[in-house]
Image: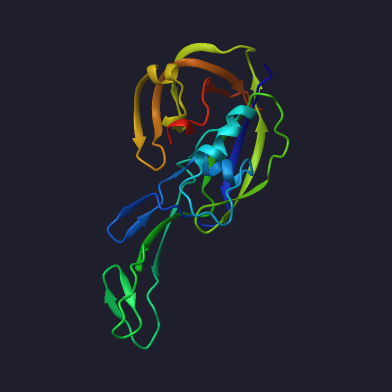
Amino acid sequence: MSITIWRGRMTLLEHVYFASREVGNRYETEPVLGNYALAYALGWCHAPYDWAGGPRYRQDLKPLNEQGLYVTPGTFDPATLRFVFSQFNGQTDTFYFRFDQNAIATVPDLKARAANFPQNGKIRLLGLGSVATCYVIDRDDSWVARPEYIRLGKFNSKAHIDWERLRLRHPETVTEERAVPYLLNAADLSPALVAGLRGYSLYHLYPAPLISQCHLAADYWVCADARGDEIAIPAGMQFGVASL
């Protein structure tokens, strides 16, 4: 099997917003980039423009496992990470309005339908200039369309990616315990990887929690970048969409 590992450094060129967490009327973006969102942003799969069903992770991401493509979540460099706060007001500007239950009515004596979206509040966004790193595992060495720019988040914000192909130091995996300095998706770990977890922190996000600061006993692909710095990637990760 021919395997290629790429490192992508993503620089946000615009503020990025995901509704990661809701605290009262404040809607916060956690300092992470989910790898399912990255799979769509990289153009590996496409959701239909008009879709009335539920989440499509299984039908969209399962073919990527068959193709041997995988991307890790994006981990932000703390030295570059910045946040931006903003306010929004989605209330009507009509002459007449009143507050109904979960809705704003604009016609007297006519009850408005409930709306499942916030009408005002504050949002926390990832600030432009923040830099995140992800790793792409290409098991068949067939991924050639590496985008230089992608769009992220609810506002379709622009980000630039610098790609670097990492050099494998060993043709086979190496078994050892390491501290993993980047995020992993808990749903994407094989049973052997789960058994090797020694300690970790969690971001409780939908559709799957992300693991940070973990110590993991596992088989690793050991790589080096252009400067000679060593990077170890756990073997056995794929999109865990079967349970979603």
Residue at the limit of the structure toward the bottom, as seen here: 95
Say which of 228 and 163 sits in front.
163
Residue 89 picture location, percent across and down: 38, 71
Residue 128 picture location, percent across and down: 53, 54
Total numbered labels placed on residues in the image = 0
Quadrant of the image for the C terminus? Answer: top left
Residue 234 picture location, percent across and down: 51, 21
Q: Is residue 16 above or below residue 189?
A: below
Quadrant of the image for the N terminus? Answer: top right
Relative side of 79 to 163, left or right: left
Residue 55 picture location, percent across and down: 47, 46
Q: Quadrant of residue 211?
A: top left
Say which of 159 and 90 sits in front.
90
Q: Is residue 60 above or below residue 69?
A: below
User: What residue is drawn where x is 41% and y is 53%?
Assistant: 19
User: What residue is drawn where x is 72% and y is 29%?
Assistant: 142
Relative side of 177 to 13, left or right: left
Q: Is residue 51 above or below residue 186?
A: below
Say which of 59 and 158 sits in front.
59
User: What residue is drawn where x is 56% and y is 57%?
Assistant: 50
Say which of 15 and 144 sits in front.
144
